[in-house]
Amino acid sequence: MEKKLRGVNLGGWLVLEKWMAPSLFQGAPANDEYYLAYDLPEPEYQARILVHRESFITEADFLRISAAGFNTVRIPVPYFVFGDRAPFIGCVDYLDKAFSWAKAYDLKILIDLHTAPFGQNGFDNGGLSGVVRWAQMPEEVEFELTVLERLAQRYAGHEALWGIEVLNEPITEGEVWNSMSPMERFPARDATLAEGSAPITLSFLQTFYQHAYHRMRSYLRDEHVIVFHDGFQLHAWKEFFIRNDFKNVMLDTHQYIMMAELAGTEQSLEGYKVFIAGLGKEISEVAKYVDVFVGEWSLFNSYAVGTDTKGGINPTQEEFSRTRSLTKSELEEIYQTLWRASITAWNQGEGHMYWTYKLSIDTINEPAWYGWDSWDASRAMAKNWIDPNY
Amino acid sequence: MEKKLRGVNLGGWLVLEKWMAPSLFQGAPANDEYYLAYDLPEPEYQARILVHRESFITEADFLRISAAGFNTVRIPVPYFVFGDRAPFIGCVDYLDKAFSWAKAYDLKILIDLHTAPFGQNGFDNGGLSGVVRWAQMPEEVEFELTVLERLAQRYAGHEALWGIEVLNEPITEGEVWNSMSPMERFPARDATLAEGSAPITLSFLQTFYQHAYHRMRSYLRDEHVIVFHDGFQLHAWKEFFIRNDFKNVMLDTHQYIMMAELAGTEQSLEGYKVFIAGLGKEISEVAKYVDVFVGEWSLFNSYAVGTDTKGGINPTQEEFSRTRSLTKSELEEIYQTLWRASITAWNQGEGHMYWTYKLSIDTINEPAWYGWDSWDASRAMAKNWIDPNY
């Protein structure tokens, strides 16, 4: 690419996460998208989804994102995007609208298939907490491929398409599975449904990526990028990319300070800077054999929040008491510093996409959310914490 | 006031107007807030209202409004704000939240009682189209006074309170009633309910304003402003303000280019500038005996839209075909010019509050809405049409 990706994720819109729009889950025990559909009476579920989709992200957001200096949006979509998996409601008409908005406001879209039936990571953001069985179910693997095919077919002719990402954050075996421990961090509601959950092998994932590539490439144009998430193993892909003769692919790696904290990074500005600079070096290593970008990242960190969030455990899961509050100017200093350090590191590769553009949380009336607004690029811009044009 | 009011209305949030959030009305024949409650099954109605109120205006909007340079928000509330008029759902908890956000982001609030049972103007924005009977029903007049009293009591102690407006746009008799013709522009769905509709006399309105003033003033502090809408007769109030010894009151006048168009103003930039400059002179006349501000206004005009909108008839009522489209830079020129002319005029008084902050319309996928984004200050800022700091 001549120009680096300067992107932002439209998280929480077509794929729901409770912490990103808690009011959608009001009165329901559900902790994820899957159970929301089961907990609410159908008309109520439909009404909430309708108004959410119509209002959470709109034309005005595309206008603002573009005016702020971003050039790309990454749009997470669920496996039921085409409306063929009741009781979940399809959303491809909203994706269509997004493409028109992107074209009108000169943005490119990375479609990100963010969930898979029966789970590819067990995270709440995978749609079904504590269940990781998708890769073991050949018919669901095939279903996922048909979704990708249909997305490629539908949007290949649209000038706002930048690329399609095969699958978000498939969790791989080994150290990743142990340190991320989705089964503990996002307990399954139904133990029977979770039974047999297991991490995905790299060899399965690579085969799946190959199939996805070929089935999409036949519809996509050469300039469209097919994106593979690294499965949380940034350095496991060299041989894969050398062995396969892919046209225009990129590797997506997600880098969160909170995950570095879980791995022992010191909770201080200096500690974070060391971590980020190290990542920059790693990215430049990987960039020698494949184009790589940071498709999710955030300024969120425990130091600025004023308490150890234990890897980003949030107020819908557990309430923390803060040990200190920083001043407005201290926060500006921290976030601006981390923003510049991060962008410098991410631009060792092809660029970056912030997680996320918007959160429906209330940090004033619900002080437990203090500090969580750093996840929200729209607020971070208004607070002068980030500069998309840096 | 030392500093002029630089405000924006949070229209369409706690008082619904179909054109401001058409998707809320999806599948219902209702053209106003009143019938939406009757057309939708109760759980669906409640779910839509919940998600709308939680998402249409949030903490992030107060942050952005403040960061942009506004100092005040005017918040329309319905007569059922306290939840004592089923089937309508109270919303005072959202007003409470708004006060916390305003305090946190250094904004002041003008509470605007925007509707009355059985209608004070028959407009869709009065909640019940084509019905103007409130003033003839003593028990409903008294009810409205109790709402004002309760608002004054609840927020008098809150430092974000700037003032309370007694009643939005009561339609008065004579030329106003004839030219605005609410019964024709917003036909009643139920002729029986509309029967006996009639404009409000100035003498009734003045008595009502006196009662409202005294009942609120006993709760409010001296610095809180009690606001009276001019009933669309800017020059009818001199004697009223001289006769009454009010403490800290202001007159609110609403000035829309589209109404000037209805009255014959030429649909051109020059025509609008003449109209606006004339209003500036009128405002400075009135300001000699009472503080006056423009509590609603907009840059929306037929010239920029490219078709005669016949007084702002919108695509939920009728579809127009455009006769021409202006370029991006032509639109910038028009809106920036009108913004500066308007602010200069309005600051002959105490300042201004734009109508409105946000609209959920889609001008890209639904081209009938082309040009209607000038009503939306959040978009107008991103498009560089307006400068709240001017």
Image: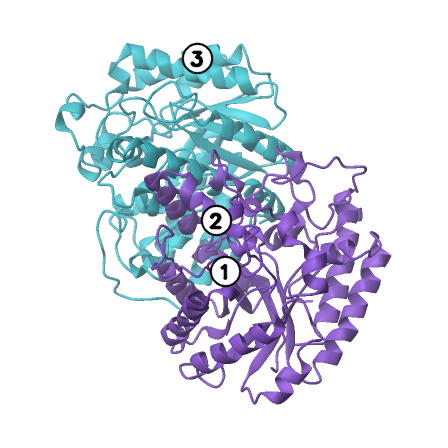
Chain colours: A purple, B cyan
Indicate the secondary structure of the residue bearing disc 1: loop
Q: Residues within 10 Å of mark 2 (few under 14, many from 20)?
A: many
Q: Residues within 10 Å of mark 3 (few under 14, many from 20)?
A: few
Q: On the rendered structure, is A390 left or right of A225?
A: right
Residue B373: x %, y % from top left: 40, 54
* Callouts 3 and 2 on one subunit: no
Q: Nearer the viewer, residue A85 or A98?
A: A85
Looking at the rendered image, the quarter that the C terminus of chain A falls into is bottom right
Give the label on residue A115, or none.
1
Q: CA distance from mark 1 to mark 2?
A: 10 Å
Give the label on residue B194, or none.
none
Indicate the secondary structure of the residue bearing disc 2: helix
Is there any visible trace of residue A26 in the rendered image?
A: yes
Q: Which residue is mark 2?
A: A33
Q: CA distance from mark 3 to mark 1?
A: 69 Å
Give the label on residue B243, or none.
3
Q: Chain of mark 2?
A: A
- The answer to whether marks 1 and 2 mark residues whose Cβ atoms lie closer than 8 Å is yes
In the rendered structure, which amino acid carries the disc numbered 1? Answer: Thr
